[in-house]
Image (cartoon, grey):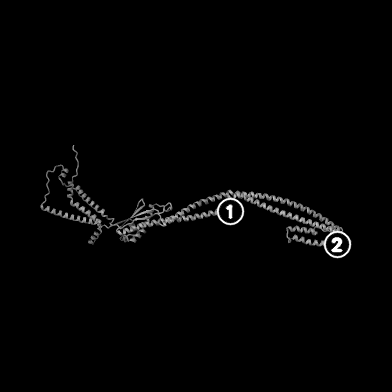
Amino acid sequence: MAVQTSSIDLRKYLFVLKRRLPLSASVFLMVLGVGVAYCLLWPPVYRAACLVVVQAQKIPTEIIQATVTTKIQERLQIITQQVLSRTRLMELIDRFNLYPKERRQLTPDELAQFMRKDISIKITTKNYFTIEYLYSDAQTVAAVTNALAAFYVDSNLRLREEDAVGTARFLNRELERMKGQLGEWENQITHFKEQHLQELPEAQEKNVALIGQLRLNAQHTNQMIQSELTRVSSYEQEQGTLEYREQTLAIQRAHNRAIGAGGGGEGTQTEETDPETIKKEIERLMVTYTDSHPDVQRLKSHLAKAEALKAEQQARRRAEAAAKGIKMQEKEKDISALDVEMNAVRASIERAAKRVAEGRQRIAEFQQQLNDINREIEAASRRLDNGPAVAEKLGELTRGYDALKHAYEKLQAKTLDANMAANLERTQRGEQFEVVDPAEVPDSPYRPDVRRAIPASFGLALVLGLALSLGLNYLDNSFTSVEQTERLGTFPVLVVLPALITRKEAMRKARVNMILLAVYGSVFLVLMAMVGILVTGRGHALKKLILGILG
Protein backbone atom coordinates (compact mmCIF):
# COMPACT_ATOMS: atom_id res chain seq x y z
CA MET A 1 0.00 0.00 0.00
CA ALA A 2 1.47 3.29 -1.08
CA VAL A 3 1.82 6.13 1.45
CA GLN A 4 0.17 9.34 0.26
CA THR A 5 2.32 12.42 0.92
CA SER A 6 1.16 16.02 0.82
CA SER A 7 3.09 18.68 -1.08
CA ILE A 8 2.76 22.43 -1.39
CA ASP A 9 1.45 23.52 -4.75
CA LEU A 10 3.19 26.85 -5.37
CA ARG A 11 1.24 27.37 -8.58
CA LYS A 12 -1.95 27.62 -6.58
CA TYR A 13 -0.55 30.33 -4.35
CA LEU A 14 0.93 32.15 -7.31
CA PHE A 15 -2.46 31.99 -8.99
CA VAL A 16 -4.06 33.45 -5.85
CA LEU A 17 -1.47 36.24 -5.68
CA LYS A 18 -1.88 36.96 -9.38
CA ARG A 19 -5.64 37.09 -8.99
CA ARG A 20 -5.35 39.43 -5.91
CA LEU A 21 -2.27 41.29 -7.11
CA PRO A 22 -3.83 44.78 -7.30
CA LEU A 23 -5.25 44.44 -3.82
CA SER A 24 -1.99 43.09 -2.35
CA ALA A 25 0.02 45.82 -4.06
CA SER A 26 -2.38 48.47 -2.79
CA VAL A 27 -2.12 47.19 0.77
CA PHE A 28 1.67 46.88 0.50
CA LEU A 29 2.11 50.42 -0.80
CA MET A 30 -0.38 51.85 1.66
CA VAL A 31 1.30 50.26 4.70
CA LEU A 32 4.74 51.22 3.42
CA GLY A 33 3.49 54.73 2.76
CA VAL A 34 2.14 54.95 6.29
CA GLY A 35 5.54 53.84 7.64
CA VAL A 36 7.39 56.38 5.49
CA ALA A 37 4.93 59.11 6.49
CA TYR A 38 5.44 58.16 10.14
CA CYS A 39 9.20 58.43 9.81
CA LEU A 40 8.94 61.64 7.85
CA LEU A 41 6.13 63.57 9.46
CA TRP A 42 6.10 62.34 13.06
CA PRO A 43 7.67 64.93 15.39
CA PRO A 44 11.20 63.73 16.13
CA VAL A 45 12.10 62.87 19.69
CA TYR A 46 15.79 62.76 20.64
CA ARG A 47 17.32 60.76 23.44
CA ALA A 48 20.47 61.59 25.37
CA ALA A 49 22.10 59.29 27.90
CA CYS A 50 24.67 59.98 30.58
CA LEU A 51 26.73 57.37 32.46
CA VAL A 52 27.52 58.11 36.11
CA VAL A 53 29.98 55.97 38.07
CA VAL A 54 30.09 55.71 41.87
CA GLN A 55 33.69 56.44 42.85
CA ALA A 56 34.87 54.77 46.03
CA GLN A 57 36.36 56.71 48.93
CA LYS A 58 39.75 58.09 47.96
CA ILE A 59 41.24 57.63 51.44
CA PRO A 60 41.42 54.03 52.71
CA THR A 61 38.65 53.07 55.11
CA GLU A 62 41.29 51.68 57.49
CA ILE A 63 42.40 55.28 58.07
CA ILE A 64 39.04 57.07 58.07
CA GLN A 65 35.74 55.24 58.38
CA ALA A 66 32.85 57.01 56.66
CA THR A 67 29.79 57.77 58.79
CA VAL A 68 27.39 57.67 55.82
CA THR A 69 26.22 54.06 55.98
CA THR A 70 23.24 54.13 53.63
CA LYS A 71 23.53 51.83 50.64
CA ILE A 72 24.06 53.28 47.20
CA GLN A 73 20.63 52.05 46.02
CA GLU A 74 18.88 53.68 48.95
CA ARG A 75 20.77 56.94 48.50
CA LEU A 76 20.03 56.91 44.77
CA GLN A 77 16.33 56.50 45.50
CA ILE A 78 16.45 59.48 47.85
CA ILE A 79 18.40 61.61 45.37
CA THR A 80 16.05 60.55 42.55
CA GLN A 81 13.08 61.81 44.55
CA GLN A 82 14.90 65.09 45.13
CA VAL A 83 15.96 65.47 41.50
CA LEU A 84 12.49 64.62 40.19
CA SER A 85 10.76 66.98 42.58
CA ARG A 86 8.55 69.68 41.13
CA THR A 87 10.92 72.42 42.28
CA ARG A 88 13.94 70.94 40.51
CA LEU A 89 12.03 70.07 37.35
CA MET A 90 10.43 73.51 37.10
CA GLU A 91 13.88 75.00 37.54
CA LEU A 92 15.09 72.99 34.54
CA ILE A 93 11.99 73.87 32.52
CA ASP A 94 12.51 77.58 33.14
CA ARG A 95 16.26 77.35 32.61
CA PHE A 96 16.09 75.57 29.22
CA ASN A 97 12.65 76.86 28.15
CA LEU A 98 11.28 73.35 27.81
CA TYR A 99 7.78 72.44 26.55
CA PRO A 100 6.78 75.90 25.35
CA LYS A 101 3.37 74.74 24.07
CA GLU A 102 2.55 72.66 27.14
CA ARG A 103 3.53 75.48 29.49
CA ARG A 104 0.60 77.51 28.19
CA GLN A 105 -1.85 74.70 28.92
CA LEU A 106 -0.61 72.76 31.94
CA THR A 107 -0.16 73.65 35.59
CA PRO A 108 3.30 73.38 37.18
CA ASP A 109 2.44 70.04 38.78
CA GLU A 110 1.11 68.65 35.52
CA LEU A 111 4.11 70.01 33.65
CA ALA A 112 6.50 68.38 36.15
CA GLN A 113 4.63 65.09 35.81
CA PHE A 114 4.81 65.43 32.01
CA MET A 115 8.58 65.85 32.20
CA ARG A 116 9.00 62.91 34.61
CA LYS A 117 7.68 60.60 31.89
CA ASP A 118 10.58 61.66 29.65
CA ILE A 119 13.25 61.00 32.31
CA SER A 120 14.57 57.50 32.88
CA ILE A 121 16.97 56.52 35.66
CA LYS A 122 18.45 53.05 35.26
CA ILE A 123 20.09 51.89 38.47
CA THR A 124 22.16 48.74 38.28
CA THR A 125 23.49 46.53 41.03
CA LYS A 126 27.03 47.58 40.12
CA ASN A 127 28.66 50.90 40.85
CA TYR A 128 27.16 52.86 38.01
CA PHE A 129 23.81 54.09 36.71
CA THR A 130 22.52 55.87 33.61
CA ILE A 131 20.32 58.92 33.14
CA GLU A 132 18.25 59.22 29.96
CA TYR A 133 16.06 62.06 28.76
CA LEU A 134 13.77 62.43 25.76
CA TYR A 135 13.01 65.75 24.09
CA SER A 136 12.24 67.16 20.68
CA ASP A 137 15.45 69.21 20.35
CA ALA A 138 18.84 67.51 20.03
CA GLN A 139 20.88 70.32 21.61
CA THR A 140 18.47 70.77 24.50
CA VAL A 141 18.16 67.08 25.29
CA ALA A 142 21.93 66.76 25.80
CA ALA A 143 22.10 69.90 27.97
CA VAL A 144 19.18 68.81 30.15
CA THR A 145 20.64 65.32 30.60
CA ASN A 146 23.98 66.76 31.71
CA ALA A 147 22.13 69.10 34.08
CA LEU A 148 20.29 66.13 35.59
CA ALA A 149 23.61 64.33 36.04
CA ALA A 150 25.06 67.42 37.69
CA PHE A 151 22.05 67.47 40.02
CA TYR A 152 22.81 63.89 40.99
CA VAL A 153 26.46 64.64 41.64
CA ASP A 154 25.72 67.78 43.68
CA SER A 155 22.85 66.17 45.57
CA ASN A 156 24.99 63.19 46.50
CA LEU A 157 27.77 65.46 47.78
CA ARG A 158 25.32 67.59 49.72
CA LEU A 159 23.46 64.58 51.12
CA ARG A 160 26.65 62.84 52.26
CA GLU A 161 28.00 66.06 53.74
CA GLU A 162 24.74 66.74 55.58
CA ASP A 163 24.68 63.21 56.97
CA ALA A 164 28.34 63.32 58.02
CA VAL A 165 28.11 66.83 59.50
CA GLY A 166 24.83 65.98 61.23
CA THR A 167 26.38 62.88 62.76
CA ALA A 168 29.42 64.88 63.91
CA ARG A 169 27.22 67.60 65.45
CA PHE A 170 25.08 65.04 67.25
CA LEU A 171 28.15 63.29 68.66
CA ASN A 172 29.66 66.65 69.69
CA ARG A 173 26.48 67.57 71.57
CA GLU A 174 26.38 64.16 73.23
CA LEU A 175 30.06 64.49 74.13
CA GLU A 176 29.47 67.87 75.78
CA ARG A 177 26.46 66.50 77.67
CA MET A 178 28.41 63.47 78.83
CA LYS A 179 31.33 65.72 79.78
CA GLY A 180 28.99 67.68 82.04
CA GLN A 181 27.74 64.46 83.61
CA LEU A 182 31.34 63.35 84.11
CA GLY A 183 32.09 66.64 85.86
CA GLU A 184 29.07 66.15 88.12
CA TRP A 185 30.26 62.67 89.05
CA GLU A 186 33.75 64.03 89.77
CA ASN A 187 32.26 66.72 92.01
CA GLN A 188 30.20 64.12 93.85
CA ILE A 189 33.24 61.92 94.43
CA THR A 190 35.37 64.90 95.51
CA HIS A 191 32.66 66.17 97.88
CA PHE A 192 32.17 62.67 99.31
CA LYS A 193 35.91 62.26 99.89
CA GLU A 194 36.09 65.67 101.55
CA GLN A 195 33.21 64.74 103.87
CA HIS A 196 34.71 61.33 104.73
CA LEU A 197 38.37 62.14 104.35
CA GLN A 198 39.44 60.17 107.44
CA GLU A 199 36.97 57.33 106.79
CA LEU A 200 38.24 56.36 103.36
CA PRO A 201 39.78 52.90 102.87
CA GLU A 202 43.28 54.31 102.52
CA ALA A 203 42.87 56.07 105.90
CA GLN A 204 41.89 52.97 107.89
CA GLU A 205 45.47 51.94 108.62
CA LYS A 206 46.15 55.47 109.85
CA ASN A 207 43.05 55.26 112.08
CA VAL A 208 44.23 51.96 113.56
CA ALA A 209 47.71 53.37 114.17
CA LEU A 210 46.19 56.58 115.59
CA ILE A 211 43.99 54.63 118.02
CA GLY A 212 47.05 52.70 119.23
CA GLN A 213 49.04 55.90 119.67
CA LEU A 214 46.14 57.64 121.44
CA ARG A 215 45.76 54.75 123.86
CA LEU A 216 49.45 54.96 124.66
CA ASN A 217 49.04 58.71 125.19
CA ALA A 218 46.01 58.09 127.43
CA GLN A 219 48.00 55.59 129.48
CA HIS A 220 50.90 58.03 129.81
CA THR A 221 48.49 60.84 130.77
CA ASN A 222 46.93 58.64 133.46
CA GLN A 223 50.39 57.98 134.82
CA MET A 224 51.08 61.72 134.84
CA ILE A 225 47.80 62.34 136.67
CA GLN A 226 48.63 59.73 139.29
CA SER A 227 52.10 61.21 139.74
CA GLU A 228 50.65 64.68 140.19
CA LEU A 229 48.05 63.39 142.65
CA THR A 230 50.82 61.81 144.73
CA ARG A 231 52.87 64.99 144.57
CA VAL A 232 49.88 67.18 145.48
CA SER A 233 49.07 64.89 148.38
CA SER A 234 52.60 65.30 149.73
CA TYR A 235 52.34 69.08 149.31
CA GLU A 236 49.01 69.11 151.16
CA GLN A 237 50.54 67.07 154.03
CA GLU A 238 53.45 69.50 154.17
CA GLN A 239 51.01 72.40 154.12
CA GLY A 240 49.07 70.86 156.99
CA THR A 241 52.21 70.39 159.05
CA LEU A 242 53.25 73.98 158.43
CA GLU A 243 49.81 75.28 159.33
CA TYR A 244 49.94 73.32 162.56
CA ARG A 245 53.40 74.79 163.29
CA GLU A 246 52.00 78.24 162.50
CA GLN A 247 49.16 77.75 164.94
CA THR A 248 51.60 76.58 167.64
CA LEU A 249 53.81 79.62 167.13
CA ALA A 250 50.78 81.88 167.12
CA ILE A 251 49.66 80.47 170.49
CA GLN A 252 53.17 80.84 171.96
CA ARG A 253 53.44 84.36 170.64
CA ALA A 254 50.06 85.28 172.09
CA HIS A 255 51.12 83.80 175.42
CA ASN A 256 54.32 85.82 175.46
CA ARG A 257 52.42 88.95 174.69
CA ALA A 258 50.01 88.26 177.45
CA ILE A 259 52.87 87.85 179.89
CA GLY A 260 54.47 91.05 178.64
CA ALA A 261 51.20 92.88 179.08
CA GLY A 262 51.01 91.86 182.71
CA GLY A 263 48.43 89.23 182.09
CA GLY A 264 45.77 91.87 181.22
CA GLY A 265 43.03 90.56 178.93
CA GLU A 266 42.39 93.89 177.27
CA GLY A 267 45.68 93.78 175.44
CA THR A 268 45.06 90.46 173.65
CA GLN A 269 43.80 90.24 170.11
CA THR A 270 41.53 87.60 168.57
CA GLU A 271 41.98 86.02 165.17
CA GLU A 272 39.44 88.51 163.73
CA THR A 273 41.53 91.47 164.94
CA ASP A 274 45.01 90.01 164.45
CA PRO A 275 46.68 91.78 161.50
CA GLU A 276 48.69 88.72 160.57
CA THR A 277 45.59 86.55 160.47
CA ILE A 278 43.80 89.10 158.33
CA LYS A 279 46.81 89.32 155.97
CA LYS A 280 46.84 85.56 155.64
CA GLU A 281 43.16 85.58 154.80
CA ILE A 282 43.65 88.34 152.22
CA GLU A 283 46.52 86.42 150.61
CA ARG A 284 44.29 83.32 150.46
CA LEU A 285 41.54 85.28 148.75
CA MET A 286 43.95 86.96 146.33
CA VAL A 287 44.76 83.55 144.90
CA THR A 288 41.18 83.37 143.61
CA TYR A 289 39.94 86.98 143.46
CA THR A 290 41.20 90.40 142.44
CA ASP A 291 41.73 93.52 144.55
CA SER A 292 38.28 94.86 143.60
CA HIS A 293 36.43 91.89 145.07
CA PRO A 294 34.12 92.95 148.01
CA ASP A 295 35.57 90.36 150.43
CA VAL A 296 39.09 91.52 149.66
CA GLN A 297 38.09 95.14 150.16
CA ARG A 298 36.33 94.32 153.43
CA LEU A 299 39.37 92.42 154.79
CA LYS A 300 41.69 95.24 153.78
CA SER A 301 39.50 97.63 155.76
CA HIS A 302 39.61 95.30 158.78
CA LEU A 303 43.40 95.02 158.35
CA ALA A 304 43.82 98.76 158.54
CA LYS A 305 41.70 98.91 161.69
CA ALA A 306 43.54 95.92 163.25
CA GLU A 307 46.97 97.43 162.55
CA ALA A 308 45.85 100.73 164.09
CA LEU A 309 44.48 98.88 167.13
CA LYS A 310 47.70 96.86 167.42
CA ALA A 311 49.85 100.02 167.30
CA GLU A 312 47.65 101.65 169.96
CA GLN A 313 47.92 98.57 172.21
CA GLN A 314 51.69 98.41 171.83
CA ALA A 315 52.03 102.09 172.76
CA ARG A 316 49.79 101.59 175.76
CA ARG A 317 51.78 98.55 176.85
CA ARG A 318 55.02 100.39 176.61
CA ALA A 319 53.65 103.21 178.67
CA GLU A 320 52.30 100.84 181.29
CA ALA A 321 55.53 98.91 181.32
CA ALA A 322 57.53 102.08 181.75
CA ALA A 323 55.27 103.10 184.63
CA LYS A 324 55.69 99.71 186.34
CA GLY A 325 59.40 99.44 185.60
CA ILE A 326 58.96 96.08 183.82
CA LYS A 327 61.68 95.19 181.39
CA MET A 328 59.99 94.50 178.04
CA GLN A 329 63.01 94.16 175.88
CA GLU A 330 63.54 90.48 176.50
CA LYS A 331 59.87 89.63 175.92
CA GLU A 332 59.83 91.72 172.83
CA LYS A 333 62.90 89.85 171.62
CA ASP A 334 61.09 86.52 172.13
CA ILE A 335 58.04 87.82 170.34
CA SER A 336 60.21 89.12 167.49
CA ALA A 337 61.86 85.71 167.12
CA LEU A 338 58.45 84.09 167.09
CA ASP A 339 57.31 86.59 164.45
CA VAL A 340 60.30 85.79 162.23
CA GLU A 341 59.68 82.09 162.59
CA MET A 342 55.98 82.56 161.91
CA ASN A 343 56.79 84.59 158.83
CA ALA A 344 59.09 81.86 157.60
CA VAL A 345 56.40 79.24 158.30
CA ARG A 346 53.83 81.34 156.51
CA ALA A 347 56.16 81.72 153.53
CA SER A 348 56.58 77.93 153.47
CA ILE A 349 52.81 77.53 153.74
CA GLU A 350 52.35 79.90 150.81
CA ARG A 351 54.90 77.96 148.77
CA ALA A 352 53.21 74.69 149.64
CA ALA A 353 49.80 76.14 148.77
CA LYS A 354 51.18 77.42 145.51
CA ARG A 355 52.63 73.98 144.72
CA VAL A 356 49.26 72.40 145.55
CA ALA A 357 47.45 74.87 143.30
CA GLU A 358 49.93 74.32 140.51
CA GLY A 359 49.66 70.55 140.93
CA ARG A 360 45.88 70.72 140.83
CA GLN A 361 46.11 72.93 137.74
CA ARG A 362 48.40 70.38 136.08
CA ILE A 363 46.01 67.59 137.09
CA ALA A 364 43.12 69.52 135.50
CA GLU A 365 45.16 70.04 132.35
CA PHE A 366 46.12 66.37 132.25
CA GLN A 367 42.51 65.42 132.82
CA GLN A 368 41.48 67.70 129.95
CA GLN A 369 44.14 66.11 127.77
CA LEU A 370 42.86 62.68 128.77
CA ASN A 371 39.29 63.69 127.91
CA ASP A 372 40.47 65.01 124.53
CA ILE A 373 42.39 61.79 123.91
CA ASN A 374 39.34 59.71 124.79
CA ARG A 375 37.21 61.79 122.44
CA GLU A 376 39.77 61.34 119.70
CA ILE A 377 39.84 57.58 120.35
CA GLU A 378 36.06 57.51 120.17
CA ALA A 379 36.04 59.53 116.92
CA ALA A 380 38.74 57.31 115.40
CA SER A 381 36.76 54.23 116.43
CA ARG A 382 33.65 55.65 114.78
CA ARG A 383 35.65 56.36 111.63
CA LEU A 384 36.96 52.81 111.74
CA ASP A 385 33.44 51.43 112.16
CA ASN A 386 32.09 53.64 109.33
CA GLY A 387 34.90 52.57 107.02
CA PRO A 388 33.06 49.62 105.33
CA ALA A 389 29.94 51.69 104.60
CA VAL A 390 32.03 54.56 103.27
CA ALA A 391 34.08 52.15 101.14
CA GLU A 392 30.88 50.63 99.70
CA LYS A 393 29.41 54.04 98.87
CA LEU A 394 32.69 55.20 97.38
CA GLY A 395 32.85 51.98 95.34
CA GLU A 396 29.39 52.66 93.92
CA LEU A 397 30.37 56.22 93.00
CA THR A 398 33.65 55.04 91.51
CA ARG A 399 32.00 52.29 89.45
CA GLY A 400 29.45 54.74 88.08
CA TYR A 401 32.19 57.24 87.31
CA ASP A 402 34.40 54.59 85.65
CA ALA A 403 31.51 53.36 83.49
CA LEU A 404 30.65 56.90 82.45
CA LYS A 405 34.30 57.70 81.80
CA HIS A 406 34.67 54.58 79.65
CA ALA A 407 31.58 55.56 77.68
CA TYR A 408 32.91 59.12 77.39
CA GLU A 409 36.26 57.89 76.03
CA LYS A 410 34.51 55.68 73.47
CA LEU A 411 32.22 58.54 72.47
CA GLN A 412 35.22 60.86 72.24
CA ALA A 413 36.93 58.45 69.83
CA LYS A 414 33.74 58.18 67.78
CA THR A 415 33.41 61.97 67.75
CA LEU A 416 36.96 62.36 66.45
CA ASP A 417 36.24 59.80 63.73
CA ALA A 418 32.97 61.56 62.87
CA ASN A 419 34.70 64.96 62.63
CA MET A 420 37.34 63.46 60.34
CA ALA A 421 34.59 61.84 58.25
CA ALA A 422 32.79 65.20 58.04
CA ASN A 423 36.01 66.88 56.88
CA LEU A 424 36.43 64.03 54.41
CA GLU A 425 33.03 64.81 52.90
CA ARG A 426 33.65 68.56 52.95
CA THR A 427 36.85 68.14 50.95
CA GLN A 428 35.06 65.70 48.57
CA ARG A 429 37.44 62.88 49.32
CA GLY A 430 34.70 60.42 50.20
CA GLU A 431 32.46 58.32 48.02
CA GLN A 432 31.04 60.44 45.18
CA PHE A 433 29.41 60.30 41.77
CA GLU A 434 31.47 61.02 38.69
CA VAL A 435 30.11 61.58 35.20
CA VAL A 436 32.40 59.42 33.07
CA ASP A 437 30.30 59.55 29.90
CA PRO A 438 28.47 62.88 29.55
CA ALA A 439 25.52 63.23 27.24
CA GLU A 440 26.29 64.29 23.68
CA VAL A 441 24.09 65.80 21.02
CA PRO A 442 22.36 62.84 19.26
CA ASP A 443 22.85 62.48 15.50
CA SER A 444 19.43 60.96 14.80
CA PRO A 445 16.06 60.95 16.52
CA TYR A 446 15.19 58.27 19.02
CA ARG A 447 11.61 58.32 17.75
CA PRO A 448 10.87 57.68 14.96
CA ASP A 449 13.79 55.28 14.51
CA VAL A 450 14.19 55.05 10.74
CA ARG A 451 16.53 52.08 10.90
CA ARG A 452 13.86 50.13 12.72
CA ALA A 453 10.67 51.68 11.39
CA ILE A 454 11.46 51.24 7.65
CA PRO A 455 12.31 47.48 7.85
CA ALA A 456 9.31 47.00 10.09
CA SER A 457 7.11 48.86 7.60
CA PHE A 458 8.42 46.69 4.74
CA GLY A 459 7.80 43.53 6.67
CA LEU A 460 4.38 44.59 7.91
CA ALA A 461 3.32 45.73 4.39
CA LEU A 462 4.42 42.45 2.84
CA VAL A 463 2.77 40.34 5.51
CA LEU A 464 -0.51 42.28 5.38
CA GLY A 465 -0.62 42.15 1.57
CA LEU A 466 -0.06 38.40 1.44
CA ALA A 467 -2.29 37.71 4.41
CA LEU A 468 -5.13 39.76 2.91
CA SER A 469 -4.87 37.97 -0.45
CA LEU A 470 -4.79 34.52 1.09
CA GLY A 471 -7.51 35.39 3.58
CA LEU A 472 -9.89 36.66 0.90
CA ASN A 473 -9.19 33.58 -1.18
CA TYR A 474 -10.06 31.42 1.80
CA LEU A 475 -13.36 33.25 2.23
CA ASP A 476 -14.17 33.20 -1.53
CA ASN A 477 -16.75 30.51 -2.42
CA SER A 478 -16.36 30.74 -6.23
CA PHE A 479 -14.68 27.98 -8.29
CA THR A 480 -11.42 29.00 -9.79
CA SER A 481 -10.02 25.65 -11.03
CA VAL A 482 -11.10 22.21 -12.30
CA GLU A 483 -9.44 20.54 -9.30
CA GLN A 484 -11.41 22.73 -6.90
CA THR A 485 -14.64 21.87 -8.70
CA GLU A 486 -13.96 18.13 -8.69
CA ARG A 487 -12.79 18.26 -5.04
CA LEU A 488 -15.84 20.05 -3.79
CA GLY A 489 -18.41 18.50 -6.18
CA THR A 490 -19.59 14.85 -6.64
CA PHE A 491 -19.27 14.75 -10.41
CA PRO A 492 -16.36 15.04 -12.81
CA VAL A 493 -15.73 18.09 -14.95
CA LEU A 494 -16.25 17.23 -18.61
CA VAL A 495 -15.77 20.58 -20.36
CA VAL A 496 -14.08 23.88 -19.42
CA LEU A 497 -15.21 26.94 -21.31
CA PRO A 498 -12.72 29.87 -21.25
CA ALA A 499 -13.90 33.44 -20.79
CA LEU A 500 -15.00 35.03 -24.01
CA ILE A 501 -13.12 38.35 -24.23
CA THR A 502 -13.20 40.53 -27.28
CA ARG A 503 -10.11 42.18 -28.66
CA LYS A 504 -11.38 45.56 -27.56
CA GLU A 505 -11.94 44.34 -24.02
CA ALA A 506 -8.50 42.78 -23.97
CA MET A 507 -6.88 46.01 -25.09
CA ARG A 508 -8.85 48.00 -22.51
CA LYS A 509 -7.82 45.59 -19.79
CA ALA A 510 -4.22 45.81 -20.90
CA ARG A 511 -4.36 49.62 -20.75
CA VAL A 512 -5.82 49.49 -17.23
CA ASN A 513 -3.11 47.10 -16.17
CA MET A 514 -0.46 49.36 -17.62
CA ILE A 515 -1.91 52.37 -15.87
CA LEU A 516 -2.06 50.52 -12.57
CA LEU A 517 1.47 49.27 -13.06
CA ALA A 518 2.66 52.79 -13.79
CA VAL A 519 0.84 54.20 -10.77
CA TYR A 520 2.00 51.47 -8.45
CA GLY A 521 5.52 51.69 -9.83
CA SER A 522 5.61 55.47 -9.44
CA VAL A 523 4.33 55.29 -5.91
CA PHE A 524 6.83 52.56 -5.12
CA LEU A 525 9.69 54.53 -6.59
CA VAL A 526 8.65 57.64 -4.68
CA LEU A 527 8.45 55.66 -1.48
CA MET A 528 11.85 54.09 -2.18
CA ALA A 529 13.31 57.53 -2.76
CA MET A 530 11.88 58.76 0.51
CA VAL A 531 13.19 55.67 2.26
CA GLY A 532 16.63 56.37 0.85
CA ILE A 533 16.47 59.97 2.03
CA LEU A 534 15.35 58.88 5.51
CA VAL A 535 18.00 56.18 5.80
CA THR A 536 20.75 58.61 4.83
CA GLY A 537 19.63 61.00 7.60
CA ARG A 538 18.28 63.80 5.39
CA GLY A 539 14.67 63.33 6.41
CA HIS A 540 14.60 66.64 8.30
CA ALA A 541 15.38 68.58 5.09
CA LEU A 542 12.79 66.60 3.14
CA LYS A 543 10.24 67.30 5.84
CA LYS A 544 10.91 71.04 5.60
CA LEU A 545 10.55 70.85 1.82
CA ILE A 546 7.23 69.02 2.00
CA LEU A 547 5.87 71.33 4.71
CA GLY A 548 7.00 74.29 2.63
CA ILE A 549 5.17 72.97 -0.45
CA LEU A 550 2.06 72.19 1.57
CA GLY A 551 2.21 75.41 3.46
Expressed as whole percent of the image width and height from the top left, the position of residue 91 reads: 35, 60
- Around disc 1, counting alpha carbons within 10 Å, would you say few (fewer than 14), some (14 to 19), or many (20 or more)? few
Which residue appears at 75% of the width and 51% of the height? 234
Q: CA distance from mark 1 to mark 2?
A: 84 Å
User: Can residue 517 be seen in this snapshot?
Assistant: yes
- Helix, strand or loop under label 2: helix
Q: Which mark is residue 195?
A: 1
Q: Is residue 107 left or right of residue 280?
A: left
Expressed as whole percent of the image width and height from the top left, the position of residue 260 reads: 86, 58
Split into 4 quadrants, where in the image is the N terminus? top left
Q: Is residue 209 left or right of residue 66?
A: right
For marks 1 and 2 on the same chain, the one whose residue lies earlier in the sequence? 1
Expressed as whole percent of the image width and height from the top left, the position of residue 529 reads: 21, 56
Q: Is residue 30 left or right of residue 341?
A: left
Q: Is residue 52 left or right of residue 11?
A: right
* Residue receiving disc 2: 318
Q: Amino acid at mark 2?
A: Arg
53 vs 13, nearest the viewer: 53
Split into 4 quadrants, where in the image is the C terminus? bottom left
